Image: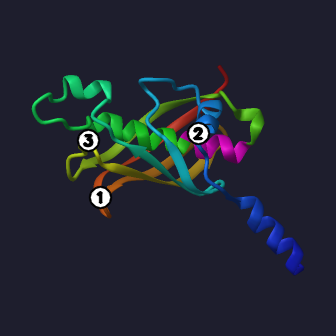
Amino acid sequence: MNMQTDKTSVSQAAATAVDIKRILAMIPHRYPMVMVDRVIEMRLDERAIGIKNVSINEPFFQGHFPSDPVMPGVLIVEAMAQTAAVLVVATFGPDSEGKLVYFMSIDGARFRRPVVPGDRLELHVEKIQSRANVWKFAGKAIVDGKVAAEATFAAMIRDR
């Protein structure tokens, strides 16, 4: 294989940041359930890092908990899954935009520290395995360099 071929395959596998407008085109989630503001790093078919800027304006903080707001763990896992969905859609290309990604399983979920308003949640997802339309991921949610939550999850990609 020549050097030009190697450079081409590397550039095709590495993707640049994905902003919120593009995320909204890629996945069907809408307010108040969009849990990813941006994908800052992605290696197609392998891994991605998404960002969720946690704000006191999030609707769930009205009831979880008003005097001591904490982001619900299930929504942290959802944010990891949405980051994974962006990776899957980017890997399959434009023809897969708008497909639905359904949870099949969530395993080993651990919540290490609370996520609170003002936190910048980094959503690290890495593909463990994929077979046809079923993908399995390992995810970590990180705040200030410390793991806030982690889980392994599987999802099925389907047409609408």
Task: Name the element at disc 1.
Answer: strand
Q: Which of label 3 and label 2 is nearer to you?
A: 3
Between the C-alphas of marks 1 and 3, the distance is: 16 Å
| For discs 1 and 3, the disc positioned in front in the rendered view | 3
Q: Amino acid at mark 1?
A: Val
Q: Earlier in the sequence, mark 2 or mark 1?
A: 2
> Neighbour class for label 1 at 10 Å: few (<14), some, many (≥20)?
some
Residue 76 position in % (x across, y down)? 34, 40
Q: Characterize the magenta stretch by its predominant secondary structure.
A: helix
Q: Which mark is residue 147?
A: 1
Q: Which of pointers 1 and 3 lies earlier in the amino acid sequence?
A: 3
Q: Secondary structure at mark 2?
A: strand
The x and y percentages for residue 130 are: 60, 48
Which residue occupies 56% across, 44% down? Answer: 135
Residue lying at 30% horizontally and 61% vertically, measured from the top left: 144
Residue picked out by circle 3: 117
Taking the spot 65% from the left edge, 28% from the top edge, the residue there is 99
Direction from residue 147 to residue 45 in the image, left or right: right
The magenta stretch is 85-92
57 left or right of 23?
Answer: left
